[in-house]
Image (tube, rainbow, N blue to C red):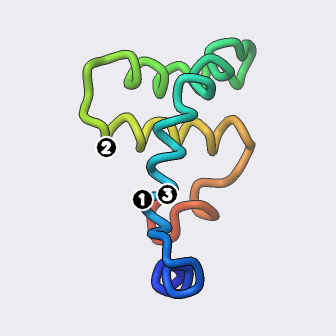
Amino acid sequence: MIKAEFGRITTISLEQSFMYNLDNYTPTRIALMKAKGGVLGTKLRPFLETLSQNQSIDMRRDSVIRSLRLYLGEKQQDLFEGKA
């Protein structure tokens, strides 16, 4: 519903625009997350390992979004409705 309304107002695909920008800023986000130490760095490490493996673009995007959620201190249920 939000995607349709956004497209109607702006004539831009919300999902394509988001994915393009996510891919564009991924290297910078990875560098920020690798620099983190302590408890947060430990929690981010599995996501960063997934990113370093040769994975599909969808898996890389998933890892970046999930690690960004941790980095920002957001609860998973608040970001991914219906997923635990």
Instruction: Sort mark 1 into few (<14), some (14-19) or many (20+) by Cα contacts within 10 Å.
Output: few
* Residue type for callout 2: Asp
> Quick one: label 3, few (<14), some, or many (20+) residues within 10 Å?
few
Q: Marks 3 and 1: in contact by CB < 8 Å?
A: yes
The correct choice, above or below, for 16 with respect to 31 in the image is below
Give the camera-side residue of 30 and 36: 30
The residue drawn where x is 44% and y is 36% is 63
Q: Are marks 3 and 2 in contact (CB under 8 Å)?
A: no
Label 3 vs label 2: CA separation? 15 Å
Residue at image location 62% in from the left, 17% down from the top: 31
Find residue 42 and report its image quarter.
top right
Which amino acid, by three-letter code, is at mark 1?
A: Gln
Which is closer to the viewer, label 3 or label 2? Answer: 3
Q: Secondary structure at mark 2?
A: helix
Closer to the observer: label 2 or label 1? 1
User: Residue 5: which quarter of the image?
Assistant: bottom right
When the figure is inspected, residue 7 is found, relative to residue 45, above or below; the finding is below
Question: Which numbered disc covers residue 58?
Answer: 2
The residue lying toward the viewer, choosing from 2 and 59, is 2
Q: CA distance from mark 2 to mark 1?
A: 13 Å
Relative horizontal placement of residue 2, taking residue 63 as reference (left or right): right
Residue beneath disc 1: 16
Q: CA distance from mark 1 to mark 3?
A: 4 Å
User: With respect to residue 32, does 26 lie above or below?
Assistant: below
Q: Earlier in the sequence, mark 2 or mark 1?
A: 1
Could you tell me how many numbered marks the image carries? 3
Front position in the image: 77 or 34: 34
Picture layout, residue 34 above or below residue 26: above
Instruction: Name the residue beneath numbered marker 3.
Output: 17
Marks 2/1 in contact by CB < 8 Å: the verdict is no
